[in-house]
Image (tube, helix red, strand yellow):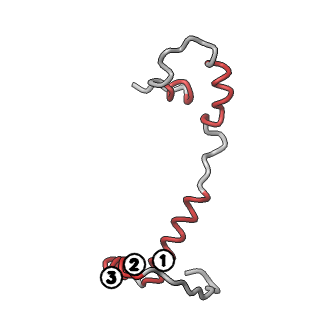
Amino acid sequence: MTADPVRLQAYFPKDMYEQLRHESLRLGLSMAEVIRQAVQEYLQKENDVPHPEDPIWRITELAATYGSSHLRDGAENHDRYIYDEDTK
């Protein structure tokens, strides 16, 4: 736990509380620690943004380039066109 923790009180539906209690027993952790880990995981997922250099962000440029072409395999080979990779 980080320094200077802040106390928080929360109310849970009984079934959720029982699931939390069961999980904490299964993991050998306090219920508070299970909640902290779940919140940390949630916050990390919420803050995960694809890297700006990821070619997927070029999708509008690719659409302009390939959109007027006569590609017939875009659905099957989209990775090849987006990431300049062979998928085979």
Res 25 label = 3
Whole-angstrom CA distance, mark 3 to mark 1, is 13 Å
Amino acid at pointer 1: Ile
Element under label 3? helix
- Specify the quadrant that holds the N terminus: bottom right
Residue sticking out furthest to the top: 70
Foreground of the two, 17 or 77: 17
Distance between mark 2 and mark 3 Cα atoms:
9 Å
Residue type at tag 2: Leu
Instruction: Verify CB contact (< 8 Å) between mark 1 and mark 2.
Output: yes
Which residue sits at x=54%, y=69%? Answer: 40
Reply above or below: 16 against 46.
Answer: below
Residues tagged 2 and 3 counted as in contact (Cβ below 8 A): no
Cα distance between the residues tagged 1 and 2:
8 Å
Residue 88 vertical placement versus 21 (above, below): above
Q: Looking at the picture, which amino acid does disc 3 mark?
A: Leu
- Looking at the image, which residue is at 66% across and 19% down? 65
Q: Name the N-terminal-most of marks 1 and 2.
A: 2
